[in-house]
């Protein structure tokens, strides 16, 4: 696991690069208990922020220039505040995308020096890119007194991902990063953005991430294709039910009538989304009633749907879910995030974690030829300034 950032060393690194006295901001990565691939279909999600972050140290300039460096990547991006084209270095692009979003809203920062650091693993499905964009947005907003609200900054982060990374992602990741609250899951309605906090603090209960260490390299094209498939199914439903605005409004009998007879793949994609929204609402009730067995079973069902109907799993993710299916102390498990790699999320009794991780690490490595990393999740707060 990436070691935690040491704030004084991070501040010193900024001073070594640029001089001056920076302000420091941070935004967390996220997990998601249930509600996968529902956000861009106007559905429900149940994420939480975690205690791993992307950090930005920043100080303003008055000459219209920007300099961006990173602790973990080589090179310094230097340019003008008006030049928000993608960088040849690649890693500054999210920051540039966010800057572009500010400029489009008529906010012209006067220039800045910026250092990026992180203790969030990249490519593990923990939304390091949303955390990065949210931190930059929040930092620019504070330093230049731009008075955007959190939803504006979330939209800017989402647009940066669309335009600068080419992934047509939904709103869940930046929302969880900005609005996370320690000890709570965030139940978000992705259509209205209405949200409320669901306590997650039962003694002896933990969330454990198991990282396949498969990087989701094909994910962006497949992700965009899933979005298109959902849009196609929606269009077919709308030809018979014009009042339907999104898959959120669709039920399975509409799919039986309008989609199943036309295309099995499109039907599977849409049916998974319809079922997943219902599962999330049911899981929230299970949690309220303290029925962890029922909640966990829904996570297993979600995995099954993501693997067989939505087709975004991979053999390593399936392996890790199957390995814990009948294991005492594991209530539920499923792949998490966009898919094709990254982590499974496991709802477990805290006291089985050590044995589970040591046994699974050995068998996973023997059977898959790669190592397994375990991450115990602590649910933390959303984006903030680091005051020291
Ligand atoms: C990625 C996207 C999110 C969401 C998930 C799947 O993390 O960034 O918007 O669609 O995949 O639930």
Image (cartoon, rainbow, N blue to C red):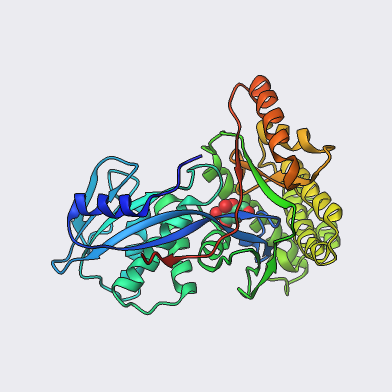
**The C terminus, quarter of image:** bottom left
Q: Ligand 1: give its quadrant.
A: bottom right
**Residue 139 shows in this picture:** yes
In this view, the residue in front, 11 or 264, is 11
**Residue 263 shows in this picture:** no
In this view, the residue in front, 187 or 203, is 203
- Figure quadrant of residue 20: bottom left
Residue 334: horizontal and vertical position, in percent?
A: 72, 45
Q: Is residue 267 left or right of residue 388?
A: right
- Residue at image location 46% in from the left, 57% down from the top: 131
Residue 301: horizontal and vertical position, in percent?
A: 80, 48
In this view, the residue in front, 237 or 218, is 218
- Residue at image location 35% in from the left, 46% down from the top: 91
In this view, the residue in front, 61 or 171, is 61
Q: Is residue 233 left or right of residue 70?
A: right
Residue 9: horizontal and vertical position, in percent?
A: 31, 49
Q: Is residue 367 left or right of residue 180?
A: right
Decide: is 131 above or below 317. Answer: below
- Figure quadrant of residue 248: bottom right
- Residue at image location 83% in from the left, 49% down from the top: 297
Residue 64: horizontal and vertical position, in percent?
A: 17, 66
Q: Residue furthest bottom?
A: 147
Decide: is 228 above or below 217. Answer: below
Decide: is 194 above or below 159. Answer: below
Q: Residue furthest left?
A: 63
- Figure quadrant of residue 364: top right
């Amino acid at each position: 696991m990436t070691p935690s950032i040491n704030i004084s060393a991070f501040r010193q690194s900024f001073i070594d690069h640029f001089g001056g006295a920076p302000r420091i901001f941070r935004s967390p990565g996220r997990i998601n208990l249930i509600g996968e691939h529902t956000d861009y279909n106007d559905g429900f999600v149940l994420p939480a922020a975690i205690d791993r972050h992307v950090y930005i140290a920043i100080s303003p300039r008055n000459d219209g220039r920007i300099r961006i460096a990173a602790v973990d990547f080589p090179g310094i991006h230097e340019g003008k505040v008006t030049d928000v084209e993608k960088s040849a270095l690649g890693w500054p692009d999210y920051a540039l995308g966010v800057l572009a979003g500010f400029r489009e809203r008529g906010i012209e920062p006067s220039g800045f020096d910026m250092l990026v650091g992180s203790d969030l693993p990249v490519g593990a499905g923990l939304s390091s890119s949303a955390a990065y964009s949210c931190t930059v947005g929040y930092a620019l907003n504070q330093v230049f007194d731009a008075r955007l609200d959190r939803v504006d900054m979330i939209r800017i982060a989402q647009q940066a991902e669309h335009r600068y990374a080419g992934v047509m992602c939904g709103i869940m990741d930046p929302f969880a990063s900005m609005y996370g609250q320690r000890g709570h899951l965030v139940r978000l309605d992705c259509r209205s953005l209405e949200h409320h906090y669901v306590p997650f603090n039962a003694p002896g209960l933990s969330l454990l991430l198991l990282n396949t260490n498969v990087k989701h390299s094909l994910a962006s094209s497949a992700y965009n294709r899933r979005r298109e498939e959902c849009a196609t199914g929606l269009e077919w439903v709308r030809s018979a039910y014009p009042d339907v605005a999104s898959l959120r409004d669709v039920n399975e009998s509409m799919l039986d009538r309008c989609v199943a007879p036309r295309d099995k793949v499109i039907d599977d994609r849409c049916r998974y989304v319809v079922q997943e929204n219902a599962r999330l609402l049911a899981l929230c009730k299970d949690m309220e009633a303290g029925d962890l067995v029922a909640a966990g079973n829904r996570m297993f069902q979600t995995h099954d749907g993501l693997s067989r109907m939505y087709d975004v799993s991979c053999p390593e993710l399936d392996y890790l879910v199957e390995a814990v299916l009948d294991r005492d102390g594991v209530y539920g498990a499923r792949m998490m995030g966009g898919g094709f790699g990254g982590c499974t999320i496991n709802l477990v009794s805290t006291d089985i974690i050590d044995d589970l991780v040591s046994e699974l690490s050995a068998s996973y490595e023997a059977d898959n030829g790669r190592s397994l990393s375990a991450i115990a999740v602590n649910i933390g707060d959303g984006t903030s300034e680091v005051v020291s």
